[in-house]
Every structure is written in structure tokens, then in C-alpha cells.
Amino acid sequence: MLLKVEPPDGWSSQDGRVLFDAEREAERFAAMARLAFSLAIACVMLALSMIVGRWNDWVAVIAGANIALSALGAVLARASVFPRLLPWLGVFADALLLFGIGWFGPWIETLSAGMRSALVSPWGAFLLLAITSLGLNAWRLFVQALLFVLAIGLFIWWPSPGGQAVTIDPRLQLPFSDGSNATRLAIVLLTGLAMALAASRARKTLMLAIRTARERAVLERFNGFSATNATNSLSSAMPSMSASGCRPPPGNSAHRSWFRPRPSTTPGSPAQTDGQGMRASVCVGAARPSTPMPIMRQAELRWNPPGPDRRQAGP
């Protein structure tokens, strides 16, 4: 499926722990961002109430409930033991908050079905979706979008009790018709799906980055160990090779061979007539394998050697 992210090739349990720590830090950041936005919205509503000169108790209750819910999520996110179900509980709590704003408020009785889509509170779903996207969980975003569509739909089309609600002007029937409201809900759902796809892509990129960083660290450690080992081997072999007549090439590189001149024994060569012809023979301390072992395989065997009761696998 589009939202499913498979682990890349070479994924290990160590990479999974790193990914879990990154997701936990992202959830903490999202919880703190949710609290900051809740406080900002409360300040905006307070400022507007002071400017207009009107105070609505129900609006104050909504702002207080939002701040309390955000503060609870931030406190739990900063705990030493992070519950895995906490973000999912926050998703359902947000949907219940939107539904409760419409259900327990005065608009069910005062506004007819269809006109309630003009209220501000249902469209706070876009902000909540954006905050949830900080957690990089595609399925949570998609489920939250579905819950928001369900909650807003129930709020918009729930019939008014008693039939005493304000009727809509015939000239405004088209913007608040069923087709227009269904389009609004479709936009909410598609927005959540787009954010879920973006979160899925970001999660896949993060997993590839974690795996690449681990492999690069292993290769750097292996290459550093190999260079040190080669230098030490060359230094320890220098006295015995010098005694046998071998001499190092210019630069004394650890990756070059040592050569010992010896007379050529090829019949008819100038060396047999004037003694000046010479050719070199390589002084080798250890034989090289005929088939080179892959670098990652060498690194794995170096840092995870097989036990005495196991046979070493081939390259």
C-alpha cells in the first residue's frame, strides 16, 4: 500500500532502536508544539473578546479544554517511559473535542443542518492534522483525517431538535448545500491523505539515512583498523625481511611490496655474460586470497567474529 513502509535491505535491530528514539523525540516535539498553538489560540480569542467587548463563556470552555488536553499530552510525552498508545489516544481525543464543541454547544438548536459548516471550530481540523504530521506516522494521520470527517459530518447534518432552528435564506442555499458540505469534507480527507503520504516518504528517507550512517560508521572503523594493522604488521616484519635481503620501495608505504634483487636465470639473458642483468622477486609476508572478500563482509567478521563452535562463512 501507499502508506506502508518496509525496512530497507540490511536493516538491523540497532537501526530499529535508533528509529524508535527518533520517533519518540518527534512525538515530544509535536506535543510541545500542540501546547504552544493552544496557548496562542487562547490568547487570540482573548484579545478579540477584549476588542469586540463581548465575552462568550462557551468559547472560554473550549479554549480551556484544548489547553488542558495539550498540557496533558506534553507532560506524558516528557515522561521517562513513553507509552506507545499515547499518540493514538491523542488522535481520538482531538476528534471527540471537535465533536463535543458542536454537540454540547448552542449551535445544534439554533442553526439548521448545513449552515453549521460556516462555524470556525470544525475547521480547526487542519491545524490538528498539521501538528500530528510532526510525528511522522502516516497511519495515524490517515485515521485522524477519517475521524475528523466523521465528527464534522455528524455535526453538520445532525437534525435540529424541535425544528425551531434558524432556516437558511434561499439565496444562500448553494454555499451550504449538501454538495458543498460534502466537498468541504472531501478536502479535509484528501488533505489528511496528502500529509500521510508525506509522512510515509519522510519515514522511509529517515530509515535509509539511519542504515547508511550505520554502514558508513562500520566501514570507517574497519578501514581505520585495517590501516593500523597493516602498518603494525609491516613494522614487525621489517627486521626479518631486511635480514633476508629485501628492501622497501621509496616512501615505505604499507600497501607496497618489498623487493629483493637476484640474478636472472633465464638462458641467453645478458645476466649470464656480464653479471649485470637483475630482476626482482617479491618478498611476501602473508599470502593474499585469490578472491577478495567484500568490504562489508570483512567488517562484519572483524567486529562479529564467529564462535569456536561455528564454521566461518565464505565471502
Image (cartoon, grey):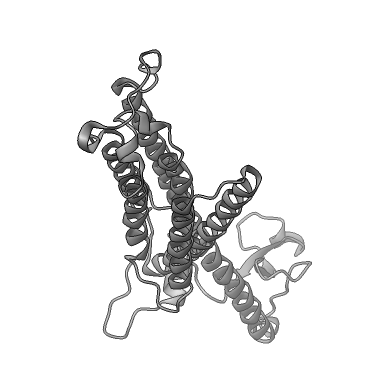
Percent position of residue 186, x then y = 34, 30
| Towards the viewer: 19 or 310 | 19
From what the image shows, is residue 242 above or below residue 201?
A: below
Of 232 and 287, nearer the camera is: 232
Q: Quadrant where the N terminus lies?
A: top left
Residue 239: in sight, yes or no? yes
Residue at figure coordinates x 45%, y 65% from the top left: 68
In the rendered view, tell whether residue 166 sits above or below residue 102.
above
How many numbered callouts? 0
Which residue, as the protein is rendered here, is positioned at the far top? 171
Q: Looking at the image, is 209 positioned above or below residue 257?
A: above
Q: Residue at x 59, y 54 (%)?
A: 40
| Residue 12 falls in image quadrant | bottom left
The location of residue 43, given as percent across then percent down, is 60, 54
- Quarter-of-image position of residue 256: bottom right
Task: Indicate the quadrant containing the C terminus: top left, top right, bottom left or bottom right.
Answer: bottom left
